[in-house]
Amino acid sequence: MSRAALLVLSDGRFPAGGHAHSGGAEAAVVAGRIRNADDLAAFCRGRLHTTGLTAAALAAAAAHGHDPLALDEAADARTPSPALRAVARKLGRQLMRAARATWPGEELDAFALARPRGGHQPVVLGLTARSAGLAPEDAAHCAAYETVGGPATAVVRLLSLNPFDATAVLARLAPELDHVAELAAAAARGPIGELPAFSAPLLDIAAEAHAARPVRLFAS
Amino acid sequence: MSVRATARITAVRDARGATTLPVLESDGPLALRRTRAVVPGVARVTVVGAMSAPLGGDRLAVQVRAGQGARLTVDSAAATVALPGPGPEAAAAHYAITLKAEEGAELHWLPEQLISAHGSELHMTTVAELATTARLVLREEQILGRHGETTGTLLSRLTVHRAGRPLLDQQLAYGPAAPGGWDGPAVLGGYRAAGQLLVVDPAFDDRGPDARLLGATAVLTRLAGPAVLVSVLAADARELRAVLDRAAEELAAAARGRAPAAAHG
């Protein structure tokens, strides 16, 4: 594996469109559920252990070599919110464009052809990691980190939170991120039907409310 | 002493089109009673909790099969309370529900609330296998702690397959043994009652209700298949049931408006 490839893929500046999304943080700020760094930490921790683990496992499974179409179907079943399915596919499509330019490969091409409107982002992420020569656990780390990195960056803008405090939240979550990535990579060695499917009710409910809001800073 | 018990229900449609119950097997704390149908032509079974269960260490299962064209409603007489087992090192309790609905069958699984008492640990799985033309109405409600107490640990997974393909797969982990953040602003936000109503109906393939909010912490969503899921968080069991009942009525009215009356004969 190449450690540098992992840095390139996980870099927030990787041109995959993630910066336009807050991972549900904007909706939580609007609802008054995130008001300070402590709330942000609780939000990120909850997201990490629910949809974060689910996404990390899908990414690891795709990197492991499971059928991406079956994983895409599994991702649909794990995403009851149509707003979140649309976001996942849009982000998947954007990531696919960047991935085919950076680490081109036949598997990426085949999945892009089968899902022209975009596959679920964690599945595309896992395939991208595979194409970059990364391991399933690397893909899981990437997916898990995205589930907390996005909200932390967004809340800095939404609440004018001190960026040092937001980054400290992420740093303190590092051991749990490692743990989630390990769980995801272990699950990826098993059958698709047994991959984690943890969900977060408030994220699902708030996603639909956010999608219906006429004025918002972040798309999700 | 921990208990192992499996209750079984099989419903079939007889030659005259009525639903009969060739298998109705109670076991241990899971007592089954055939009760008076609310809707004519639909068989109804009520799970009567003869003892307090599940206790830590118990392994309970309910297996329900609705054969071709059968119409079955299964409900329960009282809430299920997950309680800690005896001793400080008691194991978790396990409760496994399997639901099968064959072609043309209609299965309603409408148990009362599951209450997670302080100190308990329950692992619950619900697996539904539906044929392409089967209909399913499933309600589940989780109440975290009895009045004035903190919750036990509740791990649950709901998996629904339709025509052999995954339709819904959802895990929840609440309570002291769950990973961090379960009570925080991404997951429960301090709410103590969580519930869902799932309606799978082949007629939703063409048209079904679009996603919409049913309140500040309630939403109706269309799954990636012919199904609707209502997800609700509430302060308590009563408020939760009120929102789910309203949603159920609306969805039933929508189904009546769409289907010819003969389909219910």
Image: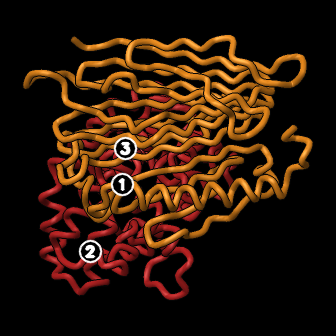
Question: Where in the figure is residue B122, as x and y percent of width and height?
Answer: 29, 31
Q: Residues within 10 Å of mark 2 (few under 14, many from 20)?
A: many
Callout 2: residue from which chain? A
Question: Where in the figure is residue B208, as x and y percent of width and height?
Answer: 74, 58
Judge from the rendering whether residue B114 lies leftward or rightward of residue B93; answer left or right: right
Same subunit: marks 2 and 3: no
- Spatial CA distance of label 1 from label 2 is 21 Å
- The residue that disc 3 covers is B172
Is residue A101 in view from this perspective? no
Kind of residue at disc 1: Ala
Q: Quadrant of residue A12?
A: bottom left
Mark in front: 1 vs 3: 1
Mark in front: 2 vs 3: 3
Q: Residues within 10 Å of mark 1 (few under 14, many from 20)?
A: many
Q: Residue furthest left?
A: B88
Q: Residue furthest front?
A: B36
Q: Which mark is residue B193?
A: 1
According to the colouring, which chain is red?
A
Kind of residue at disc 3: Leu
Quadrant containing the N terminus of chain A is: top left
According to the colouring, which chain is orange?
B
- Residue visible at 53% across and 63% down in the picture: B219
Is residue A134 in view from this perspective? yes
Kind of residue at disc 2: Ile
- The front one of A167 and B264 is B264
- Residue visible at 41% across and 62% down in the picture: A203
Q: Quadrant of residue A173?
A: bottom left
